Image (cartoon, rainbow, N blue to C red):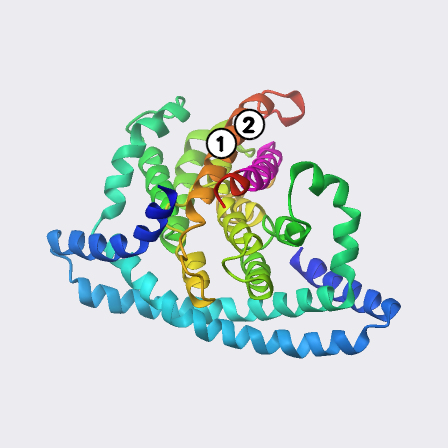
Amino acid sequence: MVEIFSEWLVPVLLIIIPFYGLVKKAKVYEIFIEGAKEGLDVVVRIFPSLLAMLVAIGVLRASGALNLLAQILMPFTQKIGMPEELVPLALIRPLSGSGALGIATELMKTYGADSFIGKMASAMYGSTETTFYVLAVYFGAVGIKNIRHSIVSGIFADIVAIISCVFYSRIFF
Amino acid sequence: MMNYIWFFMIAVGIFVGMANGKMSEVSKAIIDSAQSAVTISIGLLGVMALWLGIMKIAEKSGLMDIVAKVLKPVITKIFPEIPKDHPAVSAMIMNISANMLGLGNAATPFGIKAMEYLQELNRKENPSNAMCRFLVINTASIQLIPAVMIGLRASLGAQNPADFVIVSIFSTATALTAGLIFNNFIEKMSIFRE
């Protein structure tokens, strides 16, 4: 069931969305081209932070520091059943979206996109938002400085997201 | 914040590398990582352009309106203190629908607009409960189509690039529910008073 859903998701979107656009009399081809150009911009925009993060993680891994960190956090990660390789991703996710994307990329390159770790890294990236960024942008826009309880709730939701991601990954992958 | 974290990651890596006598591995890793940033980005380029092209059609042809219609009753339930026909409600709905479809660029302007409307209702220096609640929804927003990650997985050779989506949706839904319940509890606490 899950397999069918995920296998069909991409092709079905590829037909349904342009079809819906045509029904709504949108210039689907021209709009597509415009969007594709934005895709180019996104990649260009992501590139510097991807590079920065890949280098930092590369250094951490090659030096053995990542292993050290994993060993320190072992009591906690073992308790929730999280593979230690995912610890850096879980820590960076609420702070930097492109940083987390870089770490997830590195994990998939190292262990394979279809490995358990690779899939779980993808799911973890998609499980939560960049809490600190969201807070800064939205409250910054209306000039609010006292953020009250929002950060506590945001981080609480992040922790729940990480733990449930581990839980559901064990069920589905 | 990221400034310190990034520097800290590299500094710790290099010091541990020195202590472990792994400096040649470290220098090799630096060069290799920089190169793989290029190969990854080039691989990502095609899939990303394809996806955002398709998603642009979704945005322009008003697919968001369908999601918005489904969301309206839910949002008015979550924000009982906001009048149902206040523009803040529709701005929040558009923001959340765009987030659900993975249209981050479209979501942010709606979100900021929603915050401005909520602030008009608030008229205080500190954020209202509704504003904090809206933020919690945004920090744990459910993504039905996480276009970037699907593209990235496809470019890294995943057989089935979208197979993680179901887990993401389940865990965000759990986090969102838990986050909102928790938020309702702590917004009444005296240390967080308006």
Q: Is residue B15 visible?
A: yes
Q: Regarding mark 1 in the picture, which secondary structure is present there?
A: helix
Q: Is residue A93 magenta?
A: no
Residue lying at 61% horizontally and 38% vertically, measured from the top left: A159
Considering every residue shown, the one lying at the far right of the view is B19
Residue lying at 47% horizontally and 43% vertically, measured from the top left: B167
| Residue on which the image places disc 2 | B183
Main SS of residues in magenta? helix
Mark before the other along the chain sequence, 2 or 1: 1
State the extent of the magenta-drawn residues as a range. A147-167
Q: How many marks?
A: 2
Verify CB contact (< 8 Å) between mark 2 and mark 1: yes
Q: Is residue B79 visible?
A: no
The location of residue B118, given as percent across then percent down, is: 42, 34
The residue closer to the viewer here, B130 or B13, is B13
Q: Is residue A164 magenta?
A: yes
The location of residue A125, given as percent across then percent down, is: 52, 51
Q: Are marks 2 and 1 on the same chain?
A: yes
Q: Which mark is residue B19?
A: none
The residue closer to the viewer here, A154 or B55, is B55
Q: Regarding mark 2 in the picture, which secondary structure is present there?
A: helix
Q: Is residue B144 left or right of residue A87?
A: left
Residue lying at 68% horizontally and 50% vertically, measured from the top left: A84
The location of residue A140, given as percent across then percent down, is: 53, 47
| Residue on which the image places disc 1 | B133
Q: Is residue B105 left or right of residue A118?
A: left
| Picture quadrant of residue A97 | bottom right
Subunit ID for the residue under disc 1: B
